[in-house]
Amino acid sequence: MLPLKTPSSPHAHAMSSVSIVMLKVIVALIPGIIASVYFFGWGTLINVVLAAATALLSEAFVLRLRGHAVMPALLDGSALVTALLLAVALPPIAPWWISVLGSLFAIVITKQLYGGLGYNPFNPAMAGYAFLLISFPAAMTTWLLPEVVSGVHLNLIESLRVIFLQKWPMELHVDAVSMATPLDLIKTQLGVHRTISEIRFGTSIIGDFGGKGIEWVGNWYLLGGLWLLYMRVITWHIPFLMLATLFAFSTLFSLYDPDVYSWPMFHIFSGGTLLCAFFIATDPVTAATTPRGRLIYGAGIGALIYIIRTWGGYPDAVAFAVLLMNIAAPTIDYYTQPRVYGYDK
Amino acid sequence: MARRLHNFNGGLMLDDHKHEPTRIAAAPSHIPPRLYLPLHQHIGSPAAPVVQAGDEVLKGQLIARATDYISAAVHASSSGVVEAIADFPLPHPSGLQGPCIVIRTDGHDRWLKRDHLPRRDFRSRDAHELRQEIRDAGIVGMGGAGFPTAVKLNPGPKNKIDTLILNGAECEPYITCDDLLMRERPEEIIEGMRVMLHILGAANGVIAIESNKQEAYRCMLAAVQAVRDAALEVIMIPTIYPTGGEKQLIKVLTGREVPARGLPANIGVVMQNVATAAAVYRAVVLGEPLVSRYLTLAGGVPHACNLEVLLGTPIQFLIEELHGVRTTVDKIIMGGPMMGFALHSDQAPVIKTTNAILLSTVADRPLPARGEPMACIRCGECARVCPAQLLPQQLYWYARAREFERAQSHHLFDCIECGCCDYVCPSHIPLVQYYRYAKTEISAQLRDKQRAEIARERHESRQQRLERQKLERAQRHEARKAVVESGSLDELANAESRDAKKAAIQAAVERAKVKRESSGLEVKNIDGLAPEAQQKIAEVEARRAHRPPPDDNTVK
Amino acid sequence: MAILALALLAVVFGAVLGYAAVRFRVEGDPLVDKIDAILPQTQCGQCTYPGCRPYATAIAHGEADINQCPPGGEAGIRALAELLGREPKPLNPENGAEKPKSVAVIDEKICIGCTLCIQACPVDAILGAAKLMHTVIAAECTGCELCIPPCPVNCIVMLPLKMDPATWKWPYPQIPVKHIAGAHP
């Protein structure tokens, strides 16, 4: 008889691992990314590549500094997911250093400095986004008109030139192809006292329910998110509560004064709302973990998104809402412990 | 009778690997050359040997008696000679050795003579008498816990029992010994159940069988219908791990939850394993003590099977008996893949609570080694599957940081160590190991604290005693000094003190005499002596009666 | 106006805090008792104090450090550190080393009945009298080893306690941390 190995029970395990979970998330993101490329050109894809490369390289570098094994950590896919989420939130025509800086900040400072996978209190993608938004507001709020609106299509080479060299093709003026995001537009237009209906039907960039183009990208993220729900990678608590709260708030206020408050579908289908609901708010490391806690967390994010969008200083509030609720997550967990079997509480 | 089933939180659907071993009947295993019977196969105080090396024993003979109320006897599983009572490898996760009685078998397997015709009249017998027989037969919970059955069947006057549940769930993968027992000996189980119902005075008996044991369900149903007892019902329950856990099964069948730190008896329920019920039948009706049990041998073996094994059989003997077992076995699990523990030595014997032996080979088949643990990503899967509704994640963080108080406030000791959380963790963290570490560490700390308390008290008493002695010495010194200084008063004082002392002693003697005479107490330690000795004592007494009383110098 | 408001707030909150400090004052355990509760009560003196209580008093007065108790071990140092809000530090080797729990055993063939060990034992764990056999009550022995030096015939030995399944502890899960050659640990 060979010397016997004596591991502790259980001696069986489910076919799951962190890499598999992250892979499923990436797969769920792909339809949305493709939709983004379809509506907004190659910029998104270039951003994705830049962010991913920066994320992986910087994570490898920091892990080496910390004396950790690099390959198992890189292969778990979490840096890749962070990079993807950040990249799709950035404007397609943002200069290359935006993606790189944002990615660096997200991985090195928000994630690795706090201890690496599982130890960061703040969502790295959102922290990176917030950092970029506050530091470079102009570059971060200049979006590309969807091709269906501007009729302009930049091929790959032209996109690369725009992103790396800030050089636009000769016949185009940047103003003709760029725009503020629909959310931004509504905010500024409300500021000059136009009503919602005027804004909505007066511009070409707002589509049937959200920003033109963006609404369809949102749909694909929604589909990806529903697939994740089906695959049990995420639970329904956070996405459902977040969307429901946002919907409730916007319905309430919109009914109260439709001229001043945007309609509910707009809120849900514009900006990063759907991406956030299924991919960002559900980031397990930074969200609440107890079932009741997740309900509160999701509702909090939904409420904060509405509040910041309507009365706050920034047009899109997803990043800040998530970061604020990240701070509250441990407390929420502490006060929402489930009732244990055999106890009355 | 349709009984409404309830759900319990969490749980897993596992591949059960039960198809193969249930195709063939259980076979009796051969008699090994030596049987190693540990004195401590149960919860409670270890048994104490009543034989010694060199004694010849017969099958079913008592070789160690129960030492306490919560304790169990051990019987010889086969006939032979007691070779030794010494430390041998125990079937315990620690790999430690412990006292075992070793019997060198003679191969004849002769039973102890019992003029015991089958006594089916248990209904006319007293519950206490039946419990005593169960106790004398050394029966303990054979589902794995090993709690003395006679104690469990005595819930006390405060707990009124209305339901006896027989656990035929057998929810762990690979294990099929209860399945086969239910197929092959359903009448024994039913009869044992009726004995227990009678002892408890309970109105309802429920046998719970998981839905992946259709054949066993049919056999048990047929057996219940044959006895036509309206109190018994056979219920099929969904196959979810760990439905077979005591707390979870009670919730499923009755909707009641066992109160924390309480017992099922507190809510009117008693649960026993089906094998225990069969053993009760054998003890009460046939007069046989517990000497063998069904056991599943599976995993890295060519043909998984069930055997009826004599208690005390070394695992190595069982493995070798199955010809053709690959010699590349490097992991032996006693129990199932979720809750079983790995043995340190194949010399460990089968005991009353061994329900399965799983083998795994060097190539990690079929029980793969754990993947490299990563950081916790706080996904919450563990909490989703926990049948005790705990927060395994928090328990992990606190156990890892050795913050035992916080772990306890998150109800660490309510964890049943089922392994569901560990099974689903994407980061492959050995969660159950952390909880086990924390639990034993806390228990050890509690023991140490209690010992320290006692030591502190003893130390303080000693300090007080020393103080008191010092004080007394000082006082005496002062008194003597005063007497010396006062000069002429010396003699008088001495005489006075002597007289006082004498009077005190005399008074005490009188008191003692009066007490003795009034209570009729006589010293009786000479009663049993031979007449010559009595004569001698009488002579001595007579001599002493005529001796003068002792003088003061001998009084201290 | 703002200054007035702030000043008013300061006065109000100061009054509230002052009231709370008096009204809700909690009489806590004296620190010495709390420290003594953590110490293992071996009364061995390896900490250089004549017993656990004097050591606890010394710690409370800041005269002694928290890492002087070998029987308390690392767990004890950590508990003291947490109680006092200090950093845990390794056991001071000058005070001794952490040893497995042992009890003293008297070899009865050699014992001469001199009672020197009985007088030395801080918890009265040795039974005996002058010119009569001495024996250690194993259940009460704390393993302090104070009985060994006084014995004139060296008949006392320390035997480590045998581990049995009831008192065995599961080990802390060891996850091997992979370090890369040349990198900082």
Image (cartoon, rainbow, N blue to C red):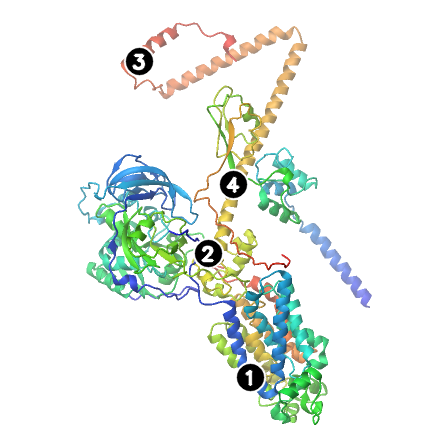
Please, which chain is the residue tagged with disc 1 on? Answer: A
Residue that badge 2 annotates: B415
The residue positioned 60% from the left and 25% from the top of the image is B468
Of the residues under marks 3 and 4, which one precedes in the sequence?
A: 4
Q: Is residue C132 left or right of residue C77?
A: left
Label placed on residue B533 = 3
Residue B203, percent from left and from top: 29, 56
Q: Quadrant of residue B295?
A: bottom left
Mark 3 touches mark 2? (CB < 8 Å): no
How far is disc 3 from disc 4 in space, using C-alphas? 51 Å
Can you say whether B267 is above or below C132 in the image? below
User: Looking at the picture, which amino acid does disc 3 mark?
Assistant: Ala
Residue that badge 4 annotates: B450
Mark 4 touches mark 1? (CB < 8 Å): no
Q: Marks 3 and 4: same chain?
A: yes
Q: Secondary structure at mark 2?
A: loop
Mark 4 touches mark 2? (CB < 8 Å): no
Residue A314, percent from left and from top: 69, 78
Please, which chain is the residue tagged with disc 4 on? Answer: B
Near-viewer residue (B131 or B446): B446
Please, which chain is the residue tagged with disc 3 on? Answer: B
Residue B433, percent from left and from top: 48, 55
Q: Secondary structure at mark 4?
A: helix
Q: Marks 1 and 3: same chain?
A: no
Near-viewer residue (B447 or B269): B447
